[in-house]
């Protein structure tokens, strides 16, 4: 009797460990891939902003899309909510990062707004640096 | 104040487009309450963080894992997964695109 109790608690512990491992590793390849990198505007790091990654339907791609927050010159998609690969249209807005964090505009003044960029994203987590050209560049 | 400029490109209908208003001080904000523009639950916030106009006015979200409950115009309530195709989701939010809303998998 006691050995059965021991065995079942051992199994339970094993199951819990496996569950914890699954949770910690994010279940491996779930079809969502992280994207991160440096982002600069006119050569300077972008201090605040955001990137919307929308599947490019004009190129036959589909999927849920993803958001990436820009902070201190780098951007990163939210954990577990990456893109699904293939052609995407990035919509990028940058701020100067000098806003009051308690205000309704915590990111400060706009540097550039909703710049579009086409990117064919790999079906794996990756790092791509982005340079946003100035308004008057060709 | 400059003319408002709808976001969301092709979709001009109600829920799928927010309105962005520029003010003289070069600050700006959206003026809609919410929109099916950004993916569901795509902005991660905990309840203690400030929700800005930019967040609220372009997003539907919830603290439910995996999606959000929507009340449809027919009165039904449906859970829509945050992994719904973005183009389909935006099309569902468009009032005047002439497309049917039936048959999608929420």
Image (cartoon, grey):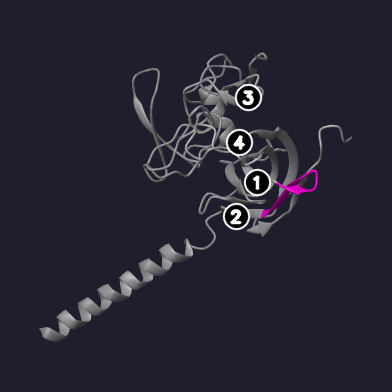
A19 or A24, which is in the foreground? A24
Q: Which mark is residue A88?
A: none
Which residue is tagged 3? B7
Specify which label sits upstream in the sequence, 4 or 1: 1
Q: Which mark is residue A34?
A: 2
State whether discs 3 and 1 lie on one chain.
Answer: no
Crowd tier of the residue under label 1, counting other residues whose Cα lies within 10 Å: few below 14, some 14–19, many 20 or above: many
Local SS, label 2? loop
Q: Chain of mark 2?
A: A
Q: Chain of mark 1?
A: A
Local SS, label 3? loop
Residue A129 included in the magenta stretch of the image: no
C-alpha gap between disc 4 and disc 1? 10 Å
**At which x and y percent is residue B12?**
61, 17
C-alpha gap between disc 4 and disc 3? 20 Å
Crowd tier of the residue under label 2, counting other residues whose Cα lies within 10 Å: few below 14, some 14–19, many 20 or above: many
B103 or A75, which is in the foreground? A75
Which residue is tagged 4? A108
**Mark 4–mark 1 CB contact (< 8 Å):** yes
**At which x and y percent is residue A48?**
62, 43
**Mark 1–mark 2 CB contact (< 8 Å):** no
Q: Residue placed farthest to the right in the image?
A: A138
> From where the camera sits, is residue B20 visible?
yes
Q: Which mark is residue A47?
A: 1
């Amino acid at each position: 009797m006691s050995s059965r109790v021991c065995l079942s608690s051992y199994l339970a512990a094993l199951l819990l460990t496996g569950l914890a491992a699954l949770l910690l590793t994010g279940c491996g390849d779930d079809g969502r891939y992280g994207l991160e990198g440096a982002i600069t505007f006119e050569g300077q790091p972008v201090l605040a902003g955001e990137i919307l990654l929308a599947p490019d339907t004009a190129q036959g791609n589909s999927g849920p899309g993803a958001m990436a927050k820009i902070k201190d010159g780098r951007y990163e998609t939210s954990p577990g909510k990456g893109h699904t690969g293939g052609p995407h249209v990035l919509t990028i807005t940058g701020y100067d990062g000098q806003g009051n964090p308690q205000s309704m505009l915590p990111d400060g003044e706009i540097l550039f707004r909703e710049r579009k960029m086409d990117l064919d994203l790999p079906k794996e987590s990756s790092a791509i640096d982005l340079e946003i050209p100035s308004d008057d560049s060709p | 104040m400059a003319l408002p400029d709808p976001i969301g490109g092709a979709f001009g209908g109600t829920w799928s487009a927010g309105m962005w208003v520029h003010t003289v001080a070069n600050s700006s904000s959206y003026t809609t309450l919410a929109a099916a523009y950004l993916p569901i639950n795509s902005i991660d916030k905990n309840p203690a963080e400030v929700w800005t106009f930019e967040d609220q006015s372009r997003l539907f979200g919830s603290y439910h894992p995996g999606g959000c409950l929507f009340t449809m115009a027919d009165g039904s309530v449906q859970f829509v997964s945050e992994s719904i195709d973005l183009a389909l989701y935006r099309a569902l939010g468009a009032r005047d695109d002439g497309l049917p809303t039936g048959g999608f998998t929420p």
